[in-house]
Amino acid sequence: MTVEFRHAETAADIAACFPAMRQLRPHLTDAEAFSARVGRQAASGYRILAAWRDGEVVGLAGYRPQENLIRGPFCYVDDLVVLDTDLGNVLGQRFYFRFGMLPVALRFAMRPIPASVADV
């Protein structure tokens, strides 16, 4: 069985990614809402690269190209389990520590993002 890597480009492709993404993001409970969210994020360059086997998504990574002053151009992978974990996810952190991975950054967030900021 061959695995094919290709981007989820169509609405059907994105919907096919939902079960795999839900494994990583269990708070996502609705396929339509997931597809709409992916569509909104696509406006800022977000894409899903999926691994397909026999027409089924068996793995994926959601990413976006970015650029900042400290690094220049780079690719940020949003949806790949080995890049970051919530500060409250102690079991996830223990998993990474066990494999010799150490934290290299602290990210700040505001939840929910006020409408006045989101509209900028």
Image: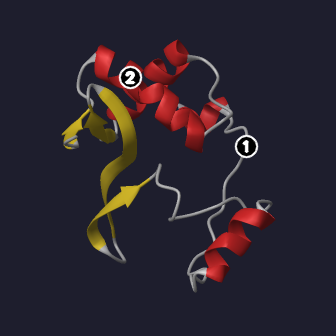
Corner quadrant of residue 84: bottom right
Front-lying residue, 35 or 23 = 23
Residue 2 located left or right of residue 84: left
59 to 41, vertically: above or below:
below
Nearest to N terminus: mark 2 or mark 1? 2
**Distance CA(mark 2)–CA(mark 1):** 29 Å
73 to 118, vertically: above or below:
below
Q: Quadrant of the N terminus?
A: top left
Q: Position of residue 6 (x, y in %)?
A: 20, 39
Q: Amino acid at mark 2?
A: Ala
Q: Position of residue 97 (x, y in %)?
A: 66, 81
Residue named by callout 2: 16
Q: Residue at x 58, y 86 (%)?
A: 100
Kindly tell me whether residue 120 is visible in this rendering. Answer: no
Front-lying residue, 74 or 25 = 25
Residue named by callout 1: 111
Element under disc 1: loop
Front-lying residue, 66 or 5 = 5
Q: Residue at x 23, y 36 (%)?
A: 7
Kindly tell me whether residue 24 is visible in this rendering. Answer: yes
45 to 107, vertically: above or below:
above
Q: Position of residue 49 (x, y in %)?
A: 29, 42
Mark 2 is surrounded, within 10 Å at the Cα level, by few (under 14), some (14 to 19) or many (20 or more) other residues, namely many
Residues tagged 2 and 1 counted as in contact (Cβ below 8 A): no
Q: Position of residue 65 (x, y in %)?
A: 28, 54
Corner quadrant of residue 73: bottom left
Q: Residue at x 38, y 59 (%)?
A: 76
Q: Residue furthest front?
A: 1
Q: How many marks?
A: 2
Q: Amino acid at mark 1?
A: Arg
Residue 3 located left or right of residue 119: left
Mark nearest the camera among 2 and 1 is: 2
